[in-house]
Amino acid sequence: MMIDDYRARFDDEPGYLDFARVAPIGRTAVEEQTALTATLATARFGSLPVLMAQHERVREAVAGIGGFRPDQVVFQPSTTQGLMHVALGLSGVVALSPQEFPSMPYAVERAAAARGVLRPAWLDNVDGRVTPGTLRDQLTDDITAVAVSLVDYRSGYLVDLEGIRQVIGDRLLIVDAVQGFGIVDAPYEVADVVCSGGQKWMRAGMGTGFLALGDRARELITPVFSNYAGSVDPYAPEVLEPAPGAAAYQGSHADPFAVGRLAAAVEEIAAVGIPAINAAIAERISRIIDLADEYALPVVSPRAESERAGIVVVEPEPAQLTVLAASLHNHGITATVRPTTVRFSAHVSTDEESLGMLKAALLSFATSI
């Protein structure tokens, strides 16, 4: 599939620059859910196996673009639930930034309080950018795992996974990939755990995601939050041990409609190729940075393509933030406005009209101040 064909599969309205929050669902995912819903609505003879086969389908699709084996992947309804699985099963000391998206700190703190076998080691002075250098300076012998976001949701910083792996040695590396999976051609094979939701860059909608665990992670992390669907024989008359591989991390059978949406979206990503998607998004991000520079808005997210994904963050003077937010609203721009910053995020479907609307909004802002 060519990138223009992929771009044509999305119907988001011009002015939408908030993909890092939640992305409009792609037409492919919508059509897949419609077809699966019709299958269950009629319940024709022999139709149920189609629904039940969606989990294996999504395992193969995610494994194909992530470099995993299918048995290392299990569907999850959200990144948060996947991270809770991991944190509840961890023991030892996990190093992480307190500035990570709340899913990670909450998971670690809740697990530490519940089981008493895990302790967080909070990284200092990372300012939204966990680098091999900042980790090297703060690693201690008692740290057994490191948890990090592939792309920081506040700063837009794309971490150096290979550099982090070299620094932390054989400690477990846990990656929250929700802000990059599907658009960043990252070396996921260096991580022990990769978790992501499908509602952002994979464009599969809410209630979709996955957890991938390497063999070492499956050995060292206990599937605490596991139920019958994650056992070696879900319908045995007695309670059995967890299944081998990532399948152990199931509480129940997944929603086949959500699983199908994610599978279809990931298969489409594989058809066009992550490098092509990444290049198209990089071009849009460069143009957003150019617009911010043109209207003297300080860009506080990375400028180098090697350190960014689909996010641009600007930080106007405090007194100007309200004016900027109002101008964006008045020109139909959807972005994430925080107390001191504004975050723009673009996808391949970000068109010329959207960039023109952003230019008009920034011109209005510059005129107002």
Image: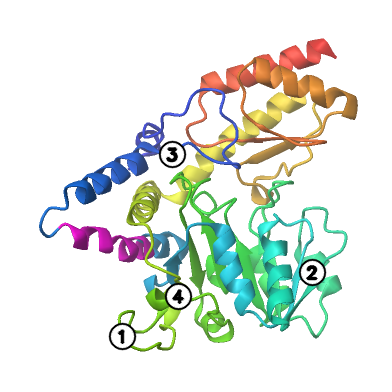
The stretch of residues the image draws in magenta is 47-60
Give the secondary structure at mark 2: helix
- Residue 75's place in the image compared with 12, above or below, is below
Residue drawn at x 74%, y 12% is 364
Give the secondary structure at mark 3: loop
Q: Earlier in the sequence, mark 2 or mark 1?
A: 2
Q: What residue would you read off at disc 1?
A: 236
Q: Amino acid at mark 2?
A: Leu
In the picture, the disc for residue 135 is 2
Q: Earlier in the sequence, mark 4 or mark 2?
A: 2
Residue 160 in the image: state x and y as whole percent: 67, 61
Residue 126 in the image: state x and y as whole percent: 83, 58
Work out which quarter of the rendered image holds the N terminus and state it. Answer: top left
Q: Nearer the viewer, mark 1 or mark 3?
A: 1
Q: Main secondary structure of the magenta part?
A: helix
Q: Earlier in the sequence, mark 3 or mark 4?
A: 3
Residue drawn at x 67%, y 20% is 329
Q: Amino acid at mark 4?
A: Ala
Q: Amino acid at mark 3?
A: Ile
Q: Is residue 31 left or right of residue 124?
A: left
Pointer 4 with pointer 2, Cβ within 8 A: no
For disc 4, the neighbor class at 10 Å (few under 14, some 14 to 19, many from 20) is many
> Between 46 and 183, which is closer to the camera in this rendering?
46
Q: Earlier in the sequence, mark 1 or mark 3?
A: 3
Q: Amino acid at mark 1?
A: Ala
Residue drawn at x 53%, y 19% is 353
Residue 58 in view (yes/no): yes
In the picture, the disc for residue 246 is 4
Q: Nearer the viewer, mark 2 or mark 1?
A: 1
Work out which quarter of the rendered image holds the C terminus and state it. Answer: top right
